[in-house]
Amino acid sequence: MQWISTISLWLIPVMIGFILIYGTLKKVATYEVFVEGGKEGVKIAISIIPFLIGMLVAITVFRESGALEFFVGLIRPALLALGIPPEIVPLAIIRPISGTAALGMMSDIVAAYGPDSFIGRLASTLQGSTDTTLYVLTVYFGAVGIRKMGDALKVGLLADLVGIAAAIFIVTIMFA
């Protein structure tokens, strides 16, 4: 497996060198194009800051207000009847919103229950089988000015729901 480490170490520098050589052979002003791309990247970074701040504030308010715990308390009996640990619900709710917040929650779950526990395996599988749908829509769609994102939102949240269901099913079948 040493060759994989060697390839991964050299892959990006070789790609950059190839692009520069190819651009030079095609008579493209590679440095000027690089600088223009950098300027555009800074503009996009500045334009997404309000979206990021809004997302972070919304997550913090949702967690700190107790709304998340209240919701989990409401559905707790149904979850237990289905054999789904209620401790996993906050992760399932936060994951489509923020990858960083979800990673923190998953780390807390794994630290509390252990990586080889049913809940630890479920949290890890759920983390890997879902995406940060609302984050992607807010930041990336907002950065390029797309305002009509209803269909993308529906499909993204459906994919997250399928990922959550698949994670529960697979971990239950494999490890329960």
Image: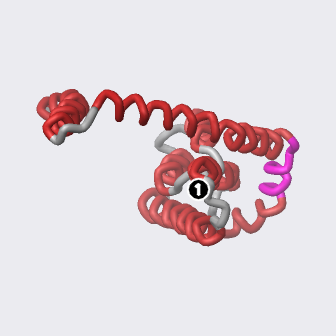
Residue 118 visible, this orientation: no
Quick check: is 142 in the magenta stretch? Answer: no
Q: In x, y percent, where is residue 129? A: 48, 56
Which residue is pictured at 69% across the width and 43% down the height? 51
Q: For residue 63, which quarter of the picture?
A: top right
Q: In x, y percent, where is residue 126? A: 53, 54
Which residue is pictured at 52% across the width and 56% down the height? 130
Range of magenta residues: 65-73
Label 1, residues with CA under 10 Å away: few <14, some 14-19, many ≥20: many
Which residue is pictured at 58% across the width and 33% down the height? 111
Q: In x, y percent, where is residue 132? A: 57, 51
Specify how the rendered protein is coloured. secondary structure
Dominant SS in magenta? helix
Q: Secondary structure at mark 1?
A: helix
Q: For residue 102, which quarter of the picture?
A: top right
Q: In x, y percent, where is residue 2? A: 14, 29
Q: Nearer the viewer, residue 19 or 7?
A: 19
Which residue is pictured at 67% across the width and 61% down the height? 147
Quick check: is 70 in the magenta stretch? Answer: yes
Q: In this image, 120 relative to 138: left or right?
A: left
Q: For residue 79, which quarter of the picture?
A: bottom right
Q: Amino acid at mark 1?
A: Thr
Q: Nearer the viewer, residue 165 or 157?
A: 157
Residue 111 visible, this orientation: yes
Q: In this image, 78 relative to 103: left or right?
A: right
| Above or below for 80 versus 43 | below
The residue wearing badge 1 is 133
Q: In this image, 25 relative to 28: left or right?
A: left
